Amino acid sequence: MMFHYRWKCAWGHADPQGIAYYPRLVNAMHRAGEEFMDEAGVAYWDIPDDYDVHLPLVAVDFEFERPVMVGDTIEIAVEPDLGTKSLGFDFTATHEDGSVAYTGHEQHVCVSAADNQSRELPGDLRDILDEGNS
């Protein structure tokens, strides 16, 4: 089962032409990933204490298909991509008519909270995220 997050483009999210300003769409995409994690039972802020790791963001990419306008509500589908030492999120944002607004990807790496060195995703964290994706 894929996770879905709904986001509405407010007046303050848009440029003078009423088109959503791209940093707001990146923020909405990132928020969708946070909501996926929270729904799975893993809040980002608890990860260092609970798992002794951090998941810093190392890459973001997205591609526009159709503009998002003031007043539009988009649904952002989140699909995690678990690597050995990384966590990626693939996103597809769609308009209410089902047309794709944009697609995107975030890549996080797993590093030790003690020394910021790369390490494998903890098994119990991986299990929770795998379960949250099913």
Image (cartoon, rainbow, N blue to C red):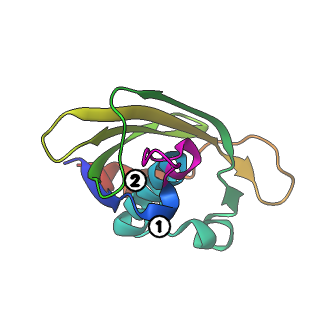
Q: Residue at x 39, y 32 (%)?
A: 103
Q: Secondary structure at mark 2?
A: helix
Label 1 element class: loop
Determine if the magenta segment contains residue 54.
Answer: no
Q: Say which residue appears at 36% left-offset and 64% top-offset.
A: 40
Horizontally, residue 3 falls left or right of residue 22, namely left
Picture layout, residue 10 above or below residue 4:
below
Residue holding disc 2: 129
The residue that label 1 is drawn on is: 42
Q: Position of residue 82 (x, y in %)?
A: 46, 38
Left or right? Give the position of 83 relative to 91: right
Q: Label 1 crowding class (10 Å Cα cut-off): few <14, some 14-19, many 20+?
A: some
- CB under 8 Å between callouts 1 and 2? yes
Question: Does 15 lie within the magenta span?
Answer: yes
Q: Amino acid at mark 2?
A: Leu
* Magenta region, residue range: 14-24
Point out the tag, 1 or 2, that comes first from the N-terminus.
1
Magenta segment main secondary structure? loop
Residue 114 placement (x, y as % from top left): 83, 60
